[in-house]
Image (cartoon, grey):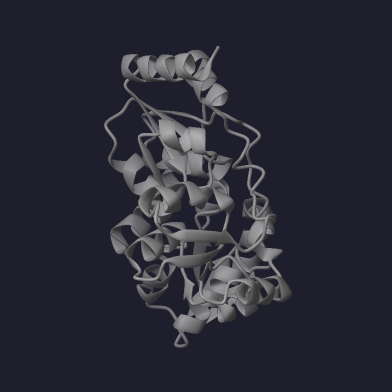
Amino acid sequence: MDKQTMISNINKMKKEQNAVIVAHSYQVDDVQEIADIVGDSFALSQYCASSTADTIVFCGVHFMAESAKILSPRKTVLLPEINAGCPMADMVTAESLREAKKKYPEAAVVCYINSSAEVKAECDICCTSSNALSVIRSIDKKDILFVPDKNLGSYVAKMCPEKNIIFWEGYCITHHKIKSHEVLASKELHPDALLLVHPECQPEIQELADFVGSTKQIIDYAKNSDHDKFIIGTEMGVLYQLKKDSPHKTFYMMSTGLICPNMKKTSLQSVHDALAFKKYEINLEKDIIERASHSLTRMLEVAK
């Protein structure tokens, strides 16, 4: 099946099934092009919560599709590539978090959205990289157990010195591997470019940046900036939207290795088969949905 025929079939099935296709900004270009909405975790969470579609085809990774199911339990949620996981999310389990909660019984528990449904069910509130600061500042307690990303936790702690944030030893394998010498070499090679990085990068990388922000915040910053050259310190999938928004600007990837292999698993064929064969439906236990929905719904209320 050629590309145009596949796209035509996808659009036809989408209409027949009252389905929407949502895609994270790290997805391959073809998938971003076919999607009804492209964005970061927060934007996609908001969209799924308000959508009137019967079916959500989530082009992302497993925890994202789970979040869509939690927010829309009566809808059919499909993850085109069932093996698209997230190593960071796997770095915390519900069992290990329950043990940590015993150790810090007075602490509020905040989970990054990059976590499983079972972990979200153990938390007080969820956050994304876009709204982590708003979420942390909304909490009355001083002590906060933050899981699983220690780099995002470190960024928030720097911005909220009044809080005592207890970090989990988790990280994004793509962002965490960026080294200072790579950043300095890139800045030396492109001295007239601004460096934009994601808070999942290590603190020393954040310190070298001109701007630190979520996927969407990086895209918006570049779009609205008077500057015309940027070094991008996040997953290469953002280049699609950056170039689309600002074709006259120049973007340099800080490293050729900034690729999330799990985000790149989804293809047009995957999306086509998801609609054609209901691959792969996400189902969660009712108890998990009810408990996890508290943390996600509270996040949406706090950080609108």
Image quadrant assignment for residue 180: bottom right
Q: Nearer the viewer, residue 193 or 209?
A: 193
199 lies left or right of 83: left
77 lies left or right of 231: left
Q: Nearer the viewer, residue 120 or 200?
A: 200
Q: In the rendered view of the protein, which quadrant contains the N terminus?
A: top right
Point 57% across, 48% down: residue: 116
One can see residue 86 in this view: yes
Q: In the figure, 121 relative to 196: above or below?
A: above
Q: In the rendered view of the protein, which quadrant contains the C terminus?
A: bottom left
Q: Position of residue 113 (x, y in %)?
A: 50, 54
Point 51% across, 72% down: residue: 193
Q: Position of residue 25 (x, y in %)?
A: 48, 47
Q: How many marks?
A: 0
Q: Nearer the viewer, residue 215 or 75?
A: 215
Q: Nearer the viewer, residue 138 or 157?
A: 157
One can see residue 104 in this view: no
Q: Position of residue 155 (x, y in %)?
A: 53, 76
Q: In the figure, 208 relative to 262: above or below?
A: below
Q: Position of residue 98 (x, y in %)?
A: 62, 60
